Image (cartoon, rainbow, N blue to C red):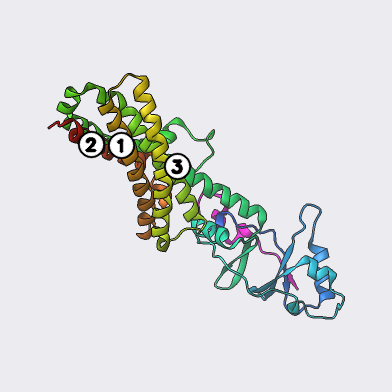
Amino acid sequence: MSHIYTHGAHYPEAHQAGDKLAHYMSADFIALSDDLTVEEGRSTFLQQISDDYFPTYVFIVCGAMLRGALPIRALLQEENVAKPITSLMTSDLVHAAPDDTRHETARLIESRGMTLIPVTEHGRLVGCLAEKEIAHLLADEATEDAQRQGATLPLEKSYLEISPVGLWKKRALWLLLLFVAEAYTSSVIQHFEEALESAIALAFFIPLLIGTGGNSGTQITSTLVRAMALGEVRMADMGRVIRKEMTTALMIAVTLAAAGCLRAWMMGIGPEITLIVSLTLLCITLWSAVVSSVIPMVIKRVGIDPAVVSAPFIATLIDGTGLIIYFKIAQYFLGLS
């Protein structure tokens, strides 16, 4: 006996927007009873395929309970047609549940390189994720991560379908939070107002310095969050990550410091300010490497998706702290109060 389960019959919400696996799983699968022989299994399989659907696997079930998966190639090429199909099946399968989240499933897929996932409920086969569904799920997850890293809440609809009011709701909260965070940057400048008045040339390099720190942090955060999503980096690797990023940042910092010297020379800036700018570039780049390496890993440690630590948030944090570094170095070398 064969079984084909109807996805929508079990989960009416399956076609609605959402991040549960029930939204992605397919009903287009073939399940064969575990008491069939190879010959009976072939006959049943050939009766159920259609011109627009030819799977690479069939599932083996006992009643509705999943027992394993059988590659179609093995079913069709087996010479002993009297052999039970259970002798050809793979029973070591990783299952998922309809209520599993897209994020959890994406991490599972990426860490194990899976191309087929049966979806079960209390052991009962209710759906599956094949290559098409997996590609759809991973694309949606990558889109959500990109939106979060861009400081906006994920969109439930396609871009052209969502209204301006909907976009406002998604973006305004993050922008307000970033606005509040940026306010301390202004406070830093106000605090060091006397230093700026004493050496007005310091102001020329503020956009350059905080922009460099933010850009450096964004590069590290984007790379690290993706590596964490793929399971390449874990909390235990924090020491290695920091050492790697600090070494890289040191090389980048030397390069940027040399560029800063050249820029200051082209502007006719004196040697003291040139030295201050170069040292600040060095310090900000190294500081950015530490912040951008540690924060995403700590965030994940406390159970929060590191993708929500958006690149703009990291950049905003580095802006203010970078200014403090800049003015403290200036105070030291220029003898300012």
Q: CA distance from mark 1 to mark 3?
A: 21 Å
Name the secondary structure under disc 2: helix
Q: Measured along the vertical axis of the image, is residue 59 above or below residue 259?
A: below
Task: Give the camera-side residue of 264 and 244.
Answer: 264
Q: Residue at x 76, y 73 (%)?
A: 1
Instruction: Indicate yes or no whether the magenta region holds residue 133.
Output: no
> Mark 3 highlights which residue?
219
Q: Measured along the vertical axis of the image, is residue 130 above or below residue 334?
A: below
**Looking at the image, can residue 190 be seen?**
yes
Say few, some or many: other residues with alpha carbon within 10 Å of mark 3 (under 14 / 14 to 19 / 20 or more): few
Residue at the farthest front position: 271
> Mark 1 highlights which residue?
279
- Of circles 1 and 3, the one toward us is 1
Q: Residue at x 76, y 55 (%)?
A: 53
- In the image, 192: left or right of 24? left
Q: CA distance from mark 1 to mark 2?
A: 8 Å
- Of circles 3 and 2, the one toward us is 2
Q: Amino acid at mark 3?
A: Gln
If you read the primary sequence from the N terminus, does the residue marked by circle 3 or circle 2 appear first?
3
Say few, some or many: other residues with alpha carbon within 10 Å of mark 2 (under 14 / 14 to 19 / 20 or more): some
Q: CA distance from mark 3 to mark 2?
A: 25 Å
**Looking at the image, can residue 169 be seen?**
no
Name the secondary structure under disc 3: helix
> Mark 2 highlights which residue?
329
Residue 314: quadrant of the picture: top left
Q: Are marks 1 and 3 in contact (CB under 8 Å)?
A: no
Q: Measured along the vertical axis of the image, is residue 267 above or below residue 110?
A: above
Q: Residue at x 42, y 40 (%)?
A: 252
Residues in magenta, as a range? 1-20
Q: Where is the C terminus found, in terms of image quarters?
A: top left
